[in-house]
Image (spheres, rainbow, N blue to C red):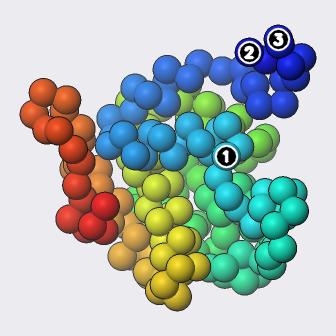
Amino acid sequence: MRYIFRTDRHHVESNWNDIWKAQSPHKTRHLLWRLCRGCLPTRVRLAQHYVDCELGCPVCDDEVEDDIHVFFGCVAARECWMAAGQSQLLENPAYQDGTVAERVFGMCRNEDNAMLGRISSLFWCIWHNRNDKIWNDNVQSPSQVGRMTFALERVVYRPSAATSEYCSCCGS
C-alpha cells in the first residue's frame, strides 16, 4: 500500500511480532502498537492535525505533551515507573535516546516477553491515568498506578479460556 502512495511516513522498520509476543492483555499490546505507529492523540499530535488545544501536559502541567513526555519524561510517569518497580528500565542508557518507537523496540529486543508484558501494562496504566485526568479530572497517585499495573499484569489473555478481558482494577 505504501508503494501505491509512495510514502514511508507511517512505516516503522522493526519486528512488530515482538510487541505481540508480550505476555499481557491485548489492550496493552495494542496501545504499544498505536504508540509505535504514532497514533496516540497526545496534545502535540492533536495540534499537528489542527486541533485547537493546550499543549501542556494535563497531568504535570510542566512540559509540552508528546509521546516521550507522557511515558518517559513526565514527573508523574517517572514516579509510576518507580512505583511499579521498573525504574531500572527507565534509567537504562539503552532506552534514553531516540523516538518512542525506537525505545519500545529496544525494550522488545533486550527484555523477555514477561518483562515486556509488565512494561506494556505500565504504559497502558500511565495512558489510562492521563485520560482519566482529562475526561474525569481524576488523577491516581503513582502508587495507585503501580498497583493497577500489578493487577493488570495478572490479567493475561488466554484465547481458549476466555472470550473477553476484564480488569477489575480499572473496570475495562
Please state, as top left, top right, bottom left or bottom right, where the C terminus lies in the image.
bottom left
Query: Residue 102 or 30: which is nearer the viewer?
Result: 30
Query: Residue 93 or 137: which is nearer the viewer?
Result: 137
Say what secondary structure mark 2 lies in.
loop
Please state, as top left, top right, bottom left or bottom right, where the N terminus lies in the image.
top right
Which residue sits furthest bottom? Answer: 137
Q: Nearer the viewer, mark 1 or mark 2?
A: 2
Residue at 78%, 61% in the rendered image: 46
Between the residue at mark 3 and the residue at mark 1, the CA separation in whole angstroms equals 21 Å
| Disc 1 + disc 2, Cβ < 8 Å | no
Residue 70 x/y as whole percent? 65, 63
Residue at 20%, 65% in the rendered image: 168
Local packing at callout 2 (Cα closer than 10 Å; few below 14, some 14-19, many 20+) is few
Which residue sits furthest left? Answer: 161
Q: Is residue 24 visible?
A: yes
Local packing at callout 3 (Cα closer than 10 Å; few below 14, some 14-19, many 20+) is few
The residue at which mark 3 appears reads as: 3
Q: Nearer the viewer, mark 3 or mark 1?
A: 3
